[in-house]
Amino acid sequence: MDGMEKIVEELKSIFTFKETTEVGDIVVVVAEEPQMILYALVMGIERDRSKKDEWWHLSLQFLTLPPQQTVWTLRTTQFSGQEIFTMAGKKKFMQAVKFSLDNDDQGGAGSAGGVKKPGLRLVK
C-alpha cells in the first residue's frame, strides 16, 4: 500500500463519505504533490460531449483563502471516490462527505460532534 492509499484509508475511517457526488456537495480532495488535503464545493457537473467515453466537467470552488475556482474533467469513478487517479502524473483522490446533524450518532465516523438539531428552545 503506497502513501496515497494509506491517506485515503485513514480518511475513510474519519469521515462518512457519500457513494455519489452531486452539485452542492462538499468534497475532500487529496493531492500527492504538493501534498495537501482540502475541501471544495461542487458548483456544477456537465457532460463532456467531445469525448467518446463518459467524462464530466466538474466545476469546483476550493474552500481556501482566497477561494479558487477550477474545472476538472473527470470520469464518474474519479470524482465519486471509487479510484485514486492522476492528473499531470500526480495522484489525486476526491469524494463527497456525508454531513449529518443527527444527535442519534454516538460520535463515530461522520459524527456531527455534538451539533444540536436546529430549532428554538425556551430560556427562562
Image (tube, rainbow, N blue to C red):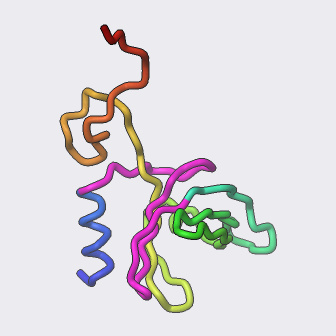
Image quadrant containing the C terminus: top left
Give, as a single range, the part of the protein colored magenta.
14-40
Residue 104 in the image: x percent, y percent? 25, 27
Judge whether residue 109 is colored magenta. no
Residue for point 60% across, 48% down: 24
Of all residues shown, which one is farthest toward the bottom?
A: 89
Query: Which residue occupies the extreme right position in the image?
Result: 50
Residue 112 in the image: above or below residue 20 = above
Q: Nearer the viewer, residue 119 or 77?
A: 119
Q: Residue furthest front?
A: 124
Give the residue drawn at x 43%, y 49%: 18
Q: Is residue 41 left or right of residue 8?
A: right
Residue 14 higher or lower than 31, as above or below: above
Image location (x, y in percent) of residue 36: 40, 77
Taking the spot 66% from the left edge, 72% from the top edge, the residue there is 73
Give the image quarter of residue 41.
Answer: bottom right
Q: Please check the rendered image and state whether residue 31 is part of the magenta-colored stretch, yes or no.
A: yes
Q: Quadrant of residue 11?
A: bottom left
Name above or below for residue 102 compared with residue 78: above
Q: Position of residue 98 (x, y in %)?
A: 41, 45
* Residue 82, quarter of picture: bottom left
In percent of the image, x 62 and y 64: which residue is there? 60
